[in-house]
Image (cartoon, rainbow, N blue to C red):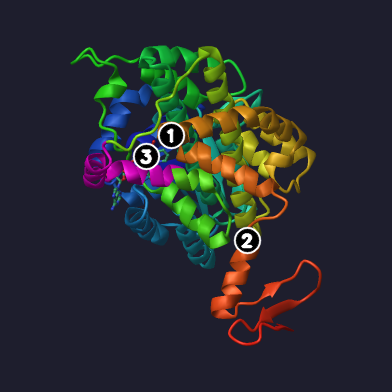
Amino acid sequence: QLAQIGVTGLAVMGRNLARNLARHGYVVALHNRSVERTRSLVADHGDEGTFIPSESMADFVASLERPRAVIIMVKAGGPTDAVINELVPLLEPDDIIIDAGNAHFADTRRREAALREQGLHFVGTGVSGGEEGALLGPSIMPGGSAQSYEKLGPIFRSIAAQVDGEPCCVHVGPDGAGHFVKMVHNGIEYADMQLIAEAYDLLREGLGASPAEIADIFRTWNSGDLESFLIEITADVLAHTDAKTGKAFVDVVLDQAEQKGTGRWTVQSALDLGIPITGIAEATFARALSGHADQRAAARRAFADAGGTPLAVADRDAFIEDVRAALYASKVVAYAQGFDHIQAGSEEFGWNIDRGATAMIWRGGCIIRARFLNRIREAYDNDPKLPSLLVDPYFAKAVADGVPSWRRVVASAAAAGIPTPAFSSSLAYYDGLRRDRLPAALIQGLRDNFGAHTYRRVDAEGTFHTQWAGDRSESPA
Ligand code: NDP
């Protein structure tokens, strides 16, 4: 008997993905650099399906039916290249290598091009949902050739999360499209979490509420527009008590947020493409700020008396509703920016990504799964060329309805000296986007003044330059 698919790299993610495949009836070939992981997977879960374990890469490849499909689930970067280099000499034309780790899409493009020359398919695939998702149904974002998806599609669709009878898996586009979309997914996840953290901070400061009380507020929010996995687990984390001290868990955790780098990649790529993903960028920088412990200590000393006016909340329910509305509006902005980024990447690299389908496959399995992704899908299905998610009629109304609350929250946070970088920058983005005239006109004037960079006029075609150092006459540039 030959295996239909193989997994090499059996740490938490690969192990659970292999089990998920076996539970769906696929015969799964197994391999890991150190054999203990392979052995323990078979020992612990061998009864969940049919596994063919191998201790050498050659035996692993030989245990697969052709065309072979091999999932690599190892540490991203050098280890992925090492495994590819070991695999390639053992493979034959039309075989498929799937990199399901968190690779940078540029690496995936490079690897795909190199392997295509050798007649192999390389499918960079985003997999989201963490350990549990990998086992019970992740959101799967495969790139690579359409031909490879003919074999992989049915397999991936069957092991993916299912929402309303639809699998959370679609062929995103060629070469690096899958990893690009996974990267933006993670960037949005950063923004989502930062917004939640700011909402929590405001509730705590404004209401003087305990984490457990705030957990209840989040639980209530989870039955409305904000319903999502992250809101649900926020309630869970806030309600948790530290066993050692009896304090709220959130109060014993060091307040320095870490990152593995996908947020940074998203921001770097957005800078290259010229897309203002301010929510994701602020979230990434907020984590960075939190980690600068020495600077924070110095600033606390230097500015000990420079705080603002404490939040004076007269109407508790109204304040909670303001924070909720501000959170929702800011979240819509973060997603609008993320989808703009996907569109820009799609145009730059010729991927032809369907944004509605992307929203669809994020509805289940992944970390940002949320009720409102249905709305995003509808928005892009109704108008695939939508210039911004914000102007879709549903979201335009949702944001407009929230604007008074949003302004109150950002203004009172500023007055109270509570940092809300994502709330504030999202509001500034919204105001910038809808502004009739932006002060960008002055920037153009300055650029022309110091560097003769030229400008365009509102009332004439072409570009112009003013003789700033001379007689200040204007001439066409
Ligand atoms: P790790 O990222 O911790 O990687 C460990 C695995 O990589 C082990 O199987 C290890 O083999 C293998 N490995 C490391 N270096 C080499 C090498 N030079 N040659 C061969 N194999 C090597 O495992 P995870 O399961 O956490 O993640 C796997 C991938 O999935 C990563 O790319 C990660 O970014 C991505 N991912 C992780 C998620 C998560 O929630 N953890 C979510 C989504 C994606 P050995 O046992 O021999 O050391």
Marks 3,2: beta carbons within 8 A: no
Q: Foreground residue, 89 or 444?
A: 444
Q: Tell me the amino acid under the disc marked 3.
A: Leu
In the image, what residue occupies the spot 44% across and 47% down?
263
- Pointer 3 local density, CA inside 10 Å: few below 14, some 14–19, many at least 20: many
Q: Tell me the amino acid under the disc marked 2.
A: Ala
Residue 248, above or below 10: above
Q: Earlier in the sequence, mark 2 or mark 1?
A: 1
Can you tell me which quadrant of the image ligand 1 is in? top left
Quarter of the image that includes the C terminus: bottom right
Residue 30's tag is 3
Q: Position of residue 37 (x, y in %)?
A: 27, 36
In the image, what residue occupies the spot 44% across and 42% down?
283
What secondary structure do most residues of the magenta stretch adopt? helix
Residue 440's tag is 2
* Extent of the magenta region: 283-304
Q: Residue furthest left?
A: 244
Label 1 residue SS: helix
In the image, what residue occupies the spot 66% across and 82% down?
472
Query: Can the viewer see residue 352 in this picture?
Result: yes
Q: Position of residue 266 (x, y in %)?
A: 48, 51
Residue 143, above or below 454: above
Left or right: residue 455 versus residue 256 is right
Number of marks drawn = 3
Left or right: residue 6 versus residue 356 is left
Residue 370, above or below 389: above
